[in-house]
Amino acid sequence: MKEGVQLNDSEKAQMIETAVRLAQQYEKTCTGCAQSVVAGVLDALDLKSDEVFRAASGLADGIGLTGDRAISEIIQRINY
C-alpha cells in the first residue's frame, strides 16, 4: 500500500478481514502467533519488512517464550 493512500470504511474492513484471514492461515502452518499476525498485516498492506517480522519473534509463546500464550488469549476473546 502506498503511503498517503486514503481508504474508505469498506476498504478498511476488507483489508482487516484479509489480514485476519492471512494471520490465521500463517498460524496454522507456522505456529508463531506474533509473527503470523505481523505477516498477515504486512501482506494485507502489500508491505515487506523483514525487520518488523523478525522483531515480532520476541513475542513468541506469550511474551519472550514465557508460555503464557497472552496473544492467543487476546485473539480468542476478540473472535468469540
Image (cartoon, rainbow, N blue to C red):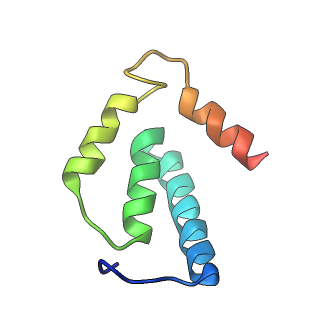
| 25 vs 16: above or below | above
Name which residue lies at 25% across and 65% down: 48
| 21 vs 60: above or below | below
User: In front: 9, or 53?
Assistant: 9
Q: Residue furthest top?
A: 66
Identify the image quadrant of residue 10. bottom right
State the image coordinates of residue 59 (x, y, percent, origin top left): 39, 31
Name which residue lies at 45% across and 83% down: 6
Is 69 on the left or on the right of 50, as rendered?
right
State the image coordinates of residue 57 (x, y, percent, origin top left): 32, 35
Identify the image quadrant of residue 21. bottom right
Identify the image quadrant of residue 80. top right
| 25 vs 32: above or below | below
State the image coordinates of residue 31 (x, y, percent, origin top left): 47, 39
User: In front: 8, or 38?
Assistant: 8
Is 12 on the left or on the right of 2, as rendered?
right
| 38 vs 11: above or below | above
State the image coordinates of residue 34 (x, y, percent, origin top left): 44, 40
| Count of numbered marks | 0
Q: Quadrant of the N terminus?
A: bottom left
